[in-house]
Amino acid sequence: MITVTEKAKEKLVSLMKDESLDDSYFLRVGVKGGGCSGLSYIMDFDDTITEMDEVVDLNTIKIIIDRKSLLYLYGTELQYSDGLNGKGFQWENPNASRTCGCGESFAL
């Protein structure tokens, strides 16, 4: 499954509050074709769950992943950094054989 660091969870909860999203919203993550390495990560807040989705309940936030993307994201960790050398969300994907410099796309 996918994991999320505490710092990333805190940032996600903060973003949801900033956007005035209630508990009916969750984080949808997935993979789509594109990017310089072939596959790109996607993430956005959503309030619709389909029967093709897997739900990861992290207590403070729920993450929804469509089953097709889960194959590419299994074992991946979502991290957040607010340091001087880079700020934002980063993916640590053990399945990736190659990643781009910005960390937003990967290949298997």
Image (spheres, grey):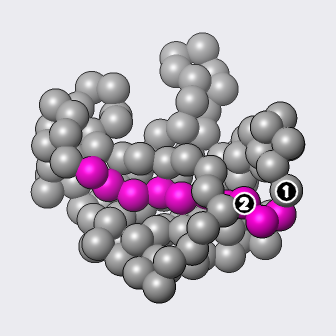
Residue nearest the observer in this picture, 25 or 104: 25
Q: Residues within 10 Å of mark 1 (few under 14, many from 20)?
A: few
Q: Amino acid at mark 1?
A: Asp
User: Residue 73: percent from the left, percent from the top?
Assistant: 35, 64
User: Residue 107: percent from the left, percent from the top?
Assistant: 15, 49
User: Residue 15: percent from the left, percent from the top?
Assistant: 75, 39
Residue nearest the observer in this picture, 5 or 39: 39
**Residue 99 in view of the camera:** no
Q: Secondary structure at mark 2?
A: loop
Given the current orientation, which residue lies at the most extreme bottom position?
51
Residue under label 1, please give it: 22
Q: Quadrant of residue 106?
A: top left
Residue 30 falls inside the magenta stretch: yes
Residue occupying the point 16% across, 31% down: 36
Residue occupying the point 30% across, 60% down: 94
Count of numbered circles on the image: 2
Residue under label 2, please give it: 25
User: Residue 95: percent from the left, percent from the top?
Assistant: 24, 62
Name the side, left or right, on which 23 lies relative to 4. right
The relative height of residue 8 versus residue 86 in the rendered view (above or below) is below
Residue bounds of the magenta highlight: 23-32
Residue 40 falls inside the magenta stretch: no
Q: Quadrant of residue 108?
A: bottom left
What distance separates the C-alpha of mark 2 from that of mark 1?
6 Å
Q: Amino acid at mark 2?
A: Tyr
